[in-house]
Image: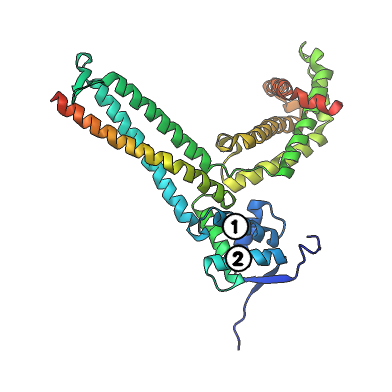
């Protein structure tokens, strides 16, 4: 007796969708279109679970990236200030 | 879906497993997609955008987590700087000008500069928090719905107030009640439309509309505020017209009248726009 697989409905996609799915499959190094769709669904679930709207994720990452440089500069600035503070304190002593 | 050369439906994939179906349905609900195919297309869009940004879609969740950690680091910097300012300010005034390696340093000025940087960091942190909330979106069909609701509601309020203001200002409320009750069907319809959008947003973000407003981007905030104003007023109007006349409270009546006046002041332009 073969295993009974529960079919949950087919999804009709266009040729353009298929082309995009193939590109993403190759990009992610996956082996099949079904795997690619499953991976994307998994991505949606993961983003959803960490409280991020999956549709907004690209924009969010783009914004974060632009802010990263500023934060790095601030970290450097704080370090040098701490050094100055130490110098001032030792000068006072 | 329309059949044409570009969108020919000649490729079908089958998804197995209850969870997969559940999540695709969830995604449909979330994006406002009306079919599985549209939901999958939303995922394709996200993946393509991430690839364009040179981000591996699979590492996106980790990257976001990392950025969140960075945000807490920024918080830490702000705290450190506040401590530095405290230390510098605690130095007696007469010792505030010191000489370090032949250079004169004014500690008071230094403390001011650090304070400015601390404020900058705080602002940056606020920006980061807002950016996390950019995902609150009001769909175009919902915007149209909100706009037409605001127009209809403003016209109803305008008509009621124009017909009754003279009597109400003299303490006679009968006509005010009648004008509202005769529009009960319209009020119920507006209430239903408004509630549909409000519940979609509240369900999606698992928080109340009031809490969502400050988190939205300015472009979306305008729509959410309009929705909130309409929702507040129409809830009160519905409550008023559905209670039996003998149970209508005078305080509620006055509160409703004031709220209607405020609403009309804010959205008068909409009431007039439809008359044209």
Q: Please tell me in which quadrant of the rendered image residue B210 appears.
A: top right
The residue at the far left in this view is A93
Q: Mark 2 to mark 1: distance in Å?
A: 9 Å
Q: Residue at x 70, y 41 (%)?
A: B195
Q: Residue furthest bottom?
A: A1
Q: Residues within 10 Å of mark 2 (few under 14, many from 20)?
A: some
Q: Position of residue B33 (x, y in %)?
A: 69, 55
**Crowd tier of the residue under label 1, counting other residues whose Cα lies within 10 Å: few below 14, some 14–19, many 20 or above:** many
On the question of residue B174 being in view, the answer is no
Residue at figure coordinates x 51%, y 56% from the top left? B55
Asked if the residues shown at circle 2 and circle 1 are in contact, with their CB atoms under 8 angstroms apart, the answer is yes
Vertical position of residue B117 compared to residue B67: above or below: above
Q: Quadrant of the C terminus of chain B?
A: top right
Q: Quadrant of residue B150?
A: top right
Chain where mark 1 sits: B
Q: Which residue is mark 2?
A: A23
Pinpoint residue B152: horizontal percent, then vertical percent: 80, 32
Mark drawn on residue B48: 1
Q: Which mark is residue A37?
A: none
Evaluate whether label 2 is on the same chain as label 1: no
Q: Colour scheme in the image?
A: rainbow
Marks counted in the figure total 2
Q: Chain of mark 2?
A: A
Give B20 or A82, whichever is nearer the viewer.
A82
Q: Which of B57/B252 is in front?
A: B57
- Which quadrant of the rendered structure holds the N terminus of chain B? bottom right
Q: Residue at x 38, y 26 (%)?
A: B116
Disc 1 element: helix
Position of residue B146 in the picture relative to residue B64 (left or right): right
Q: Is label 2 in a helix, a strand or a loop?
A: helix
| Left or right, residue B62 beside residue A86 | right
């Amino acid at each position: 007796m073969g295993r009974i697989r529960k079919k949950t409905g087919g999804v009709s996609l266009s040729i353009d969708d298929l082309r995009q799915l193939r590109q993403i499959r190759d990009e992610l190094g996956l082996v099949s279109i079904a795997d690619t769709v499953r991976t994307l669904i998994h991505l949606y679930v993961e983003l959803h679970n960490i409280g991020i709207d999956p549709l907004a994720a690209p924009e969010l990452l783009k914004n974060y990236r632009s802010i990263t440089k500023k934060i790095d500069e601030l970290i450097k600035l704080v370090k040098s200030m701490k050094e100055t503070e130490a110098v001032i304190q030792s000068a006072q002593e | 879906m329309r059949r044409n050369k570009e969108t020919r439906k000649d490729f079908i994939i089958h998804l197995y497993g209850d969870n997969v179906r559940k999540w695709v349905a969830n995604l449909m609900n979330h994006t406002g997609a009306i079919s599985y195919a549209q939901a999958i297309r939303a995922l394709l869009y996200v993946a393509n955008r991430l690839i364009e940004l040179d981000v591996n879609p699979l590492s996106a969740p980790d990257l976001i987590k990392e950025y969140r950690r960075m945000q807490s680091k920024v918080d830490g910097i702000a705290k450190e700087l506040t401590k530095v300012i405290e230390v510098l300010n605690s130095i007696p005034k007469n010792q505030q000008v010191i000489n370090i390696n032949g250079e004169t340093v004014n500690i008071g000025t230094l403390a001011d500069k650090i304070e400015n940087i601390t404020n900058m960091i705080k602002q940056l942190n606020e920006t980061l928090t807002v950016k996390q909330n950019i995902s609150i979106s009001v769909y175009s069909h919902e915007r149209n719905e909100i706009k037409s609701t605001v127009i209809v509601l403003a016209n109803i309020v305008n008509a009621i107030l124009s017909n009754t203001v003279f009597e109400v200002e003299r303490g006679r409320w009968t006509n005010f009640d009648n004008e509202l009750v005769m529009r009960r069907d319209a009020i119920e319809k507006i209430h239903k439309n408004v509630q549909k959008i409000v519940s979609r947003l509240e369900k999606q973000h698992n928080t109340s509309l009031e809490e969502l407003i400050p988190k939205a981007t300015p472009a979306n905030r305008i729509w959410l505020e309009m929705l909130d104003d309409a929702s507040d007023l129409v809830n009160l109007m519905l409550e008023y017209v559905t209670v039996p006349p003998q149970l209508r409270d005078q305080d509620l009546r006055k509160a409703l009248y004031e709220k209607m006046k405020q609403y009309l002041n804010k959205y008068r332009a909409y009431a007039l726009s439809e008359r044209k």
